[in-house]
Amino acid sequence: MSSKKRAEVQRPTFWTPLRVVTTCIALALLAAFGVSSCTSHDEKTAAPTSAPGPAMAGNALPANVRDSELRGADGAPLRISDYSGKVLLVNLWATWCGPCRIEIPELVKIHKEFQSRGVEMIGLSTENPDASEQTVRQFVRAFNIDYRVGWATPDVAVTLMQGRDSIPQSFIITRDGRIVKRFIGFSPDSTPPQLRQALEDALKS
């Protein structure tokens, strides 16, 4: 046997069965118990680096976010300003984001609970709308999403994210257009009750 072939035979394999099992267990535990999020690589490459993020808590929704015409997954344009007078939850997400996929069924439940009380939701994908159009529409059907879904422009996404490009992110907006709570990442145990409480507080304000 040549020295080259001997080196190939003796070269250790990184993904041994033990490492595969250990990695799977770690990922499962992270998804089940940790506050988990994904990095929105789409926004890293598309968002203008010069756009400063305004201070969010208690402040009015920035005009470029409030009034931008966004592409809706149902084919109709949407604007956040269309929901003036309603308590609004805006969720930034993506179809490839594991924590987002875990969170969305919870958002659907919360929307059903609160819609009759004047709460609305908008899900804004951070993906490229042309490349992800069919994927997002299929996702909406598969997850029975009953609130409006569309795409955030890079300008809208970077303004809301303020340099924290992890997703999912959710923003609770009062009837008069103030952001009163921001959530980054998702924990199955803690995030749903915190979202419900934030919506209750916004309804009282």
Image: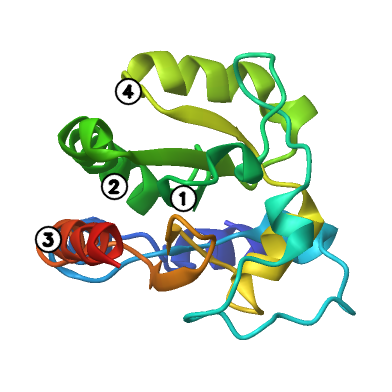
Which of discs 2 and 3 lies nearer the camera? The answer is 3
Label 1 is placed on what type of residue? Asn
Q: Which mark is residue 91?
A: 1
Q: Residue at x 46, y 67 (%)?
A: 10
Q: Are marks 1 and 2 in contact (CB under 8 Å)?
A: yes
x, y percent for residue 125: 59, 41
Residue that numbered label 3 is attached to = 193
Q: Residue at x 27, y 33 (%)?
A: 115
Label 2 is placed on what type of residue? Glu
For residue 6, above or below residue 130? below
Sequence-wise, the earlier of marks 2 and 3 is: 2
Q: Which mark is residue 103?
A: 2
Query: Separation of disc 4 and disc 3 at Cα?
Result: 21 Å
Q: Are marks 4 and 2 in contact (CB under 8 Å)?
A: no
Visible in this render: residue 180?
A: yes
Visible in this render: residue 18?
A: no
Query: Separation of disc 1 and disc 4 at Cα?
Result: 15 Å
x, y percent for residue 164: 58, 77
**Crowding near the residue tagged with mark 3, few <14, some 14–19, many ≥20 C-alpha atoms within 10 Å:** few
Q: Nearer the viewer, residue 81 or 156?
A: 81
Query: Separation of disc 1 and disc 2 at Cα?
Result: 10 Å
Label 4 is placed on what type of residue? Phe
Sequence-wise, the earlier of marks 4 and 2 is: 2
Which of discs 1 and 2 lies nearer the camera? The answer is 1
Label 3 is placed on what type of residue? Pro
